[in-house]
């Protein structure tokens, strides 16, 4: 909310009025206009964590996006690839839902599904090593988005841990992040 904006005066929603909400609702756009900066900041913060992986979490994100871009995927897909693990340091046990929640208003149902369920599809490559079911993705076999999500994890996500790969820098993706997160 901007400092100059008019503010509602209620103490409970129960006593709020249409006039109050007429002041609040336009501010959603203002808050949304700050989201791209927040997302870029969160991505930058991923550099500080490697979680034991061969590359840090920012490099993994950039490498996933770069691999998808080089394979000819469209902007929306590359955006999803870039932020699919943005929740890693906020919700390590449930990180796909963080990114899925961010992308949902701005991307197709197929891309939303791909982000939301990438964890179970990525598990195909390692969950059997850690006491989980590597075949967990099979519960989605009948989904129209199964193949898309299997391709995402198989081609771009599980492959994006190469310390010798040259990824595009985050600056390369800033215009894309700002363009897609501009408004719902
Ligand atoms: Fe992930
Ligand atoms: Fe990932």
Image (cartoon, rainbow, N blue to C red):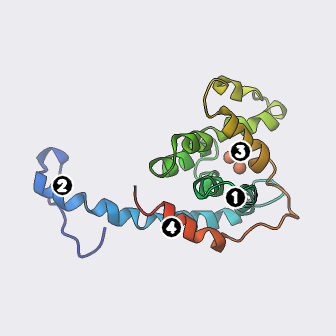
Q: Position of residue 49 (x, y in %)?
A: 71, 60
Q: Say whether marks 1 and 3 touch (CB < 8 Å).
A: no
According to the picture, the residue beneath numbered tag 2 turns out to be 21
- Of residues 63 and 179, the one nearer the viewer is 179
Q: Which mark is residue 152?
A: 3
| In front: label 1 or label 2 | 1
Residue 138: x, y in percent? 70, 25
Tell which circle, 3 or 4, labels the residue nearer the N-terminal end. Answer: 3
Query: What label sits on residue 5 in the rendered view?
Result: none
The crowding category of the residue bearing disc 4, from other C-alpha atoms within 10 Å (few below 14, some 14 to 19, many at least 20), is: some
Of pointers 1 and 2, the one earlier in the residue sequence:
2
Secondary structure under the numbered disc 2 in the rendered image: helix
In this rendered view, identify the residue nearer to me: 164 or 183: 183
Looking at the rendered image, the disc whose residue lies closer to the viewer, 3 or 2, is 3
Which mark is on residue 65?
A: 1
- CA neighbours of label 3 inside 10 A, class few (<14), some (14 to 19), many (20+): many
Say which residue appears at 63% left-offset and 51% top-offset: 84
Q: Are marks 3 and 4 in contact (CB under 8 Å)?
A: no
Check whether the beta carbons of the residues at disc 3 and disc 2 lie within 8 A of each other: no
> Which residue matches tag 4?
178
Helix, strand or loop under label 1: helix
Q: In the image, is residue 14 above or below residue 63? A: above
32 relative position to 66: left or right: left
Mark 2, residues whose alpha carbon is within 10 Å: few (<14), some, or many (≥20)?
some
Who's the residue at 88% across and 64% down the image?
164
Quote the CA–CA distance across marks 1 and 2. 39 Å
Q: Earlier in the sequence, mark 1 or mark 3?
A: 1
């Amino acid at each position: 909310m901007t400092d100059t904006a008019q503010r509602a005066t209620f103490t409970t929603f129960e006593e709020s009025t249409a006039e109050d909400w007429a002041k609040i609702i336009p501010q959603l756009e203002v808050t949304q206009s700050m989201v791209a900066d927040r997302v870029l900041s969160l991505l930058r913060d991923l550099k500080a964590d490697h979680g034991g992986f061969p590359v840090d979490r920012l490099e993994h994100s950039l490498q996933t996006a770069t691999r998808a871009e080089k394979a000819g995927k469209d902007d929306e897909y590359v955006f999803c690839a870039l932020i699919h693990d943005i929740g890693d340091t906020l919700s390590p046990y449930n990180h796909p839902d963080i990114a899925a929640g961010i992308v949902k208003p701005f991307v197709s149902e197929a891309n939303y599904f791909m982000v939301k369920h990438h964890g179970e599809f990525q598990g195909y490559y390692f969950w059997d090593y850690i006491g989980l079911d590597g075949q967990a993705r099979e519960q989605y076999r009948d989904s129209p988005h199964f193949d898309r999500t299997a391709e995402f994890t198989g081609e771009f996500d599980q492959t994006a841990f190469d310390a010798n790969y040259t990824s595009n820098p985050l600056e390369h993706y800033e215009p894309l992040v700002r363009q897609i997160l501009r408004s719902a």
